[in-house]
Image (cartoon, coloured by chain):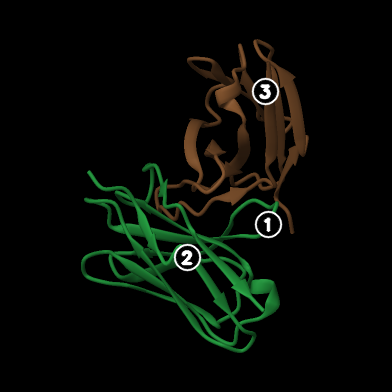
């Protein structure tokens, strides 16, 4: 049972453009929503994360938009650069006081930035 | 500061065999989680160890088992290998449970023939 749906599967964006990746979740117990970036041959690396008490979080060129009522969140990469070409995963976890940070990942988006 | 390391990098086994994968957590980290990443898919949570005790398990059969040692390094054991076990196995460590970032290792690529 896939609990986090991610789209698109692949995305090609011109250098300097905006890359947008979307995710939707089903489990209302999720309260931690990170995005990971993965380069070939490497493990995923945390890019940015948000908790549902805010609707937007920005770190440099990367912004997460969160819509709790729609159970959707998205990653926006502004001024996309060739070095941003990678696979991006959204994820979610129930991060309550009892811990257990097990993450449920989306299926990934392969982003290619072309000159 | 050394990051999360995993060994071996690649491994080829035949169906029915057993395999052990190893993970050294980042310095100061006491929590290790294991994930299976099939080709073209997102990682799937296998289980987590906190201070040598299993602390949560995903939807994987009992032939997937693990250990965490006093130095917080960890092993993933898979018995009776099946073709569908072919995947990248990722280990992630963190300083604790709630509220801490997980740092992933580069993974072990397992191929089952």
Quarter of the view holding residue A14 = top right
For label 2, the SS is strand
Q: Residue, x 61% and y 35% (percent of image)? A: A86
Is B54 placed above or below B2 here? below
For label 1, the SS is loop
Q: Which chain is green?
A: B
Of residues B35 and A101, the one drawn nearer to the viewer in this rendering: B35
Residue, disc 1: B39
Chain of residue at mark 2: B
> Chain A's shade in the image?
brown
Label 2, label 1: how many angstroms apart (C-alpha)?
24 Å
Could you classify mark 1 by the number of other residues whose Cα lies within 10 Å: few (under 14), some (14-19), or many (20 or more)?
A: few
Residue, disc 3: A113
Question: Residue B95, how many percent across, how many down?
Answer: 29, 49
For label 3, the SS is strand
Q: Residue, x 56% and y 30% (percent of image)? A: A52
Question: Residue B63, how many percent across, how many down?
Answer: 55, 83
Dots 3, 1 in contact, CB < 8 A: no
Residue, disc 2: B56
């Amino acid at each position: 049972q896939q609990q986090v749906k991610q789209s698109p599967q692949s995305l090609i964006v011109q250098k300097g453009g905006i890359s947008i990746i979307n995710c939707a979740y089903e489990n209302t117990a999720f309260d931690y929503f990170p995005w990971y970036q993965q380069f070939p041959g490497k493990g995923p690396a945390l890019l940015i994360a948000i908790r549902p008490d805010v609707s937007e979080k920005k770190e440099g060129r990367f912004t997460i938009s969160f819509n709790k009522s729609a159970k959707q969140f998205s990653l926006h990469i502004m001024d996309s650069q060739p070095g941003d070409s990678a696979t991006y995963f959204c994820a979610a976890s129930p991060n309550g006081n009892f811990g257990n940070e097990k993450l449920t990942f989306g299926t990934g988006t392969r982003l290619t930035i072309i000159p | 500061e050394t990051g999360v390391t995993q060994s071996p990098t690649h491994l080829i086994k035949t169906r029915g065999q057993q395999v052990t994968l190893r993970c050294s957590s980042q310095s100061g980290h006491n929590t290790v989680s294991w994930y299976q990443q099939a080709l073209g898919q997102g990682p799937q949570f296998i289980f987590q160890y906190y201070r040598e005790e299993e602390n949560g398990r995903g939807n994987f059969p009992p032939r997937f088992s693990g250990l965490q040692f006093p130095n917080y390094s960890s092993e993933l054991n898979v018995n009776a290998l099946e073709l569908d076990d072919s995947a990248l196995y990722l280990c992630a460590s963190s300083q604790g449970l709630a509220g801490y970032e997980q740092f992933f290792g580069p993974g072990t690529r397992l191929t089952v023939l």
